[in-house]
């Protein structure tokens, strides 16, 4: 079949138009399966801890009870001296480096430290407690026991080495302000340990809320026993715990066990109520509060 140039041009134009209308092919991206992030690993027991271990109590604000709470200036200085004293005695096996600088510090600042401890003891005496000396001694024991905990010794001694070097050049008048910051740094290894232990305990040993206390009903009053009088019978002996009267013509007395017990048993002594004093003990300087 013969094709004219006009026919060929029309076919070519039609083909070009159809080609222009065709949409380009776009390859879709590969489908990647998304998975949820893995759960965080369970908390681990801090080094030196063990199940059932007793740690410092936690306050309502989330902080932990330490001996260094609401301290006076004298208490802060003497608590720092006590913490570094424990380090000097206990850190030989955990890196050492505390004993010699500690001895040099207390010799160089003997007069200033002596003045602070006398002021601290006077603050305890001013509480008015009859046993203030025993309370003061007990507080010092708690301070030493807190910093002597074996599980935190390595971390505590590492901080104590830095603090004994930092306190050496501090003037006596500046010791209270310096002591507060130093005690916060010395307490940090203990707070970190308590926090890690609580996370482990809360994960593996969840606390169980005890059931509510249901008040019990009061015990029912005993039912009174009705006493029946047994009249004497003719021709038969009456069964009774009371001996028969001598005169057979006189009726036997009525026996009431409750009345008889009341007449023979001595009355219980009256209990005198003793008032409970409501006065609370004043807070002591440097004594921690829960």
Image (cartoon, rainbow, N blue to C red):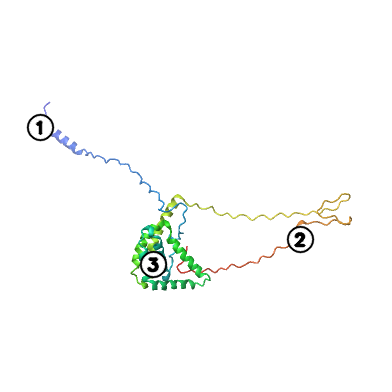
- Does the residue at mark 1 contact the one at mark 3 (Cβ under 8 Å)? no
Q: What element carries label 3?
A: helix
**Quarter of the rendering containing residue 151:** bottom left
What's the CA distance linking mark 3 and mark 2? 73 Å
Q: Is residue 257 left or right of residue 47?
A: right
Q: Is residue 4 left or right of residue 115?
A: left
Q: Which of 192 and 105 is in front in this view?
A: 105
Q: Is mark 2 on a helix, strand or loop?
A: helix
Q: Which mark is on residue 5?
A: 1
What's the CA distance linking mark 1 and mark 3? 104 Å
Q: Which mark is on residue 264?
A: 2
Residue 3 at what x, y percent from top left? 11, 29
Of callouts 1 and 3, which one flags the residue occurring earlier in the amino acid sequence?
Answer: 1
Q: Nearer the viewer, residue 95 or 137?
A: 95
Question: Is residue 56 depicted above or below 135 in this figure?
Answer: above
Indicate which label's residue lies in the foreground, 1 or 2.
2
Indicate which label's residue lies in the foreground, 1 or 3.
3
Question: Is residue 5 depicted above or below 87 in this figure?
Answer: above
- Does the residue at mark 3 contact the one at mark 2 (Cβ under 8 Å)? no
Indicate which label's residue lies in the foreground, 3 or 2.
3
Residue drawn at the location 18% of the way across and 37% of the way down: 19
Residue 200 at what x, y percent from top left? 43, 52
Residue 89 at what x, y percent from top left? 41, 62
Residue drawn at the location 48% of the way across and 67% of the way down: 137
Residue drawn at the location 40% of the way across and 57% of the way down: 152
* 10 Å crowding of disc 3: few (<14), some (14-19), many (20+): many
Residue 74 at what x, y percent from top left? 42, 71
* 10 Å crowding of disc 2: few (<14), some (14-19), many (20+): few
- Residue 166 visible: yes
What's the CA distance linking mark 1 and mark 2? 148 Å
Q: Name the residue under label 3.
A: 180
Q: Is mark 1 on a helix, strand or loop?
A: helix
């Amino acid at each position: 079949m013969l094709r004219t140039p006009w026919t060929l041009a029309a076919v070519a134009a039609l083909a070009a138009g159809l080609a222009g209308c065709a949409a380009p092919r776009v390859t879709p991206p590969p489908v990647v399966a998304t998975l949820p992030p893995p759960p965080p690993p369970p908390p681990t027991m801090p080094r030196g801890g063990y199940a059932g271990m007793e740690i410092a109590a936690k306050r309502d604000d989330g902080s932990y009870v330490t001996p260094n709470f609401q301290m006076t200036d004298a208490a802060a200085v003497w608590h720092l001296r006590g913490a570094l004293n424990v380090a000097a005695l206990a850190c030989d096996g955990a890196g050492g480096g505390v004993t010699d600088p500690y001895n040099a510090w207390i010799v160089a600042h003997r007069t200033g430290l002596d003045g602070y401890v006398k002021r601290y003891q006077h603050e305890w005496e001013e509480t008015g407690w009859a046993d203030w000396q025993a309370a003061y001694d007990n507080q010092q024991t708690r301070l030493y026991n807190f910093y002597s905990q074996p599980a935190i010794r390595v971390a505590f001694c590492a901080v104590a080495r830095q603090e004994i070097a930092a306190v050496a050049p501090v003037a006596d008048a500046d010791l209270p302000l310096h002591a507060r910051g130093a005690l916060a740094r010395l307490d940090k290894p203990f707070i970190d340990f308590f926090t890690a232990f609580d996370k482990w305990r809360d994960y593996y040993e969840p606390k169980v809320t005890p059931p509510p206390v249901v008040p019990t009903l009061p015990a029912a009053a005993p039912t009174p026993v009705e006493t029946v009088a047994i009249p004497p019978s003719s021709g038969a002996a009456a069964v009774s715990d009371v001996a028969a009267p001598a005169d057979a013509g006189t009726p036997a007395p009525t026996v009431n066990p409750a009345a008889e017990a009341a007449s023979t048993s001595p009355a219980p002594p009256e209990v005198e109520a003793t008032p409970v004093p409501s006065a609370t003990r004043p807070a002591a300087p440097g004594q921690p509060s829960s």
